[in-house]
Amino acid sequence: MKKLLVLMIALVCIPVLMANPIEPPPASIELSEIAFENNGNWVIELQSFNYYGSNEYKPIDSIFICSSSGRSKINRFKIVRENGILIIRNDSLLSNLTINPISDSISLTYFRRSYSNETTVQTSPVVYGNFVTATLCSPKTGQSIAAYGSLGLYNFGNYMRYLSEVYSLDMSPTIGLANDSTGMPGTLKGNIYDSNNQLITATDLTYYGTGFYDILPNADGSYSTRIFSYKHRIDRLYYNSGTNKFIIEIEPINVSVQPDTVVTADIHILKITGIDPVNSKAEPVIRIYPNPLTASSFKYEISIPVKSANSYIELINMTGQQIARYSITDDKGKIELPAHTANGTYTLRLFVNNKNFGTLKIILAHK
């Protein structure tokens, strides 16, 4: 009887588990590229992403191209592969649509069916020319505005696709082909200064953000990187240290970039903040005293067990450089700072068994 009961429970559970799998993402459409041909007519490339390779699961049944003059529905389209390309011209639409080559705002509206329901999807507009919100110059003949998506990645199990996060002026249009970065970037270069207006000479950190390649400082404090061609406002950078991520707030940089040009802009760091949250308990995991420090040492107390070969305290300066690491085996003790440590603000991080359990700021103010 017991075996029969177990079997009956199993038979009931299996359909329930099978009825609630993790749903893969439905098909989506993005504006991949827009260009103007020699005769002045526009051409648009759409990129479709579809896990199933067919338009049957939550199908897209209507797509509209939208400009500042109105919108028009695509007459016929077919989604047949995981990553497909649709080329759209005026003769692809049910009615003519005006797109101004000098200045316009282009977006997509499409409708996705799910059983008896319908969902409307509106993409963010791509704005170029002299619109107030424009971040792109109008493309000339032989140029395009193209999406480059290596800065974003969508994961679903073993399924991956790139998202279109950056639109750039492109001197090498690839209408009908997958976009690459050829013809898109210019060069951004200058010097990097810390919060004390001193050149950063540490080369062990890589800074990154949106719209440009990684920034690797040189030993003389200079940098040079590739940057996509649009109007940028950069007010923060990021870097990783171990499993932790840091925000670097900088004096805002406003630059307008054209392909294959060089723009000079110095980076001035204002503040560095850890994204990993400081322990939110009323009683902090680690205490140090005194703070501010008036001598070259401080005492610490830790409220969790630290008897582990991988327990330590890191000391990081305002440029994100680790200047000391102290192995700890007791929940209280005294730490001596490295000789000639300069006055200033430092980040102290506690790791127990290689996991970050606390982050705090300390101030060194020698008399």
Image: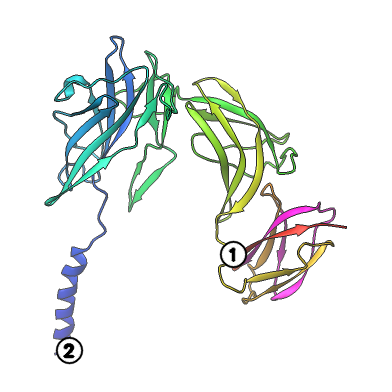
Residue 35, image quadrant: top left
The residue most toward the top is 39
Q: What residue type is labelled 1?
A: Asn
As rendered, which of 305 and 282 lies closer to the eye? Answer: 282
Residue 191, horizontal then vertical, whole percent: 68, 32
Q: Does the magenta stretch include residue 329?
A: yes
Q: What element carries label 2?
A: helix
Q: In the rendered view, tell whether residue 119 sits above or below residue 143.
A: below
Answer whether residue 164 is magenta in the image: no
**Residue 310, position in %: x, y?**
63, 67
* Residue name at image x 49 percent, y 38 percent: 210
User: Residue 351 versus residue 142: which sits nearer the camera?
Assistant: 142
Span of residues in magenta: 323-351
Between label 1 and label 2, give the one nearer the viewer.
1
Q: Position of residue 359 (x, y in %)?
A: 63, 62
Q: Name the residue under label 1.
A: 354
**Quarter occupied by residue 49:** top left
Query: Secondary structure of the magenta portion, mostly?
Result: strand
The residue where tag 2 is placed is: 2
Instruction: Name the amino acid, label 2.
Output: Lys
Pinpoint residue 55: horizontal percent, then vertical percent: 17, 42
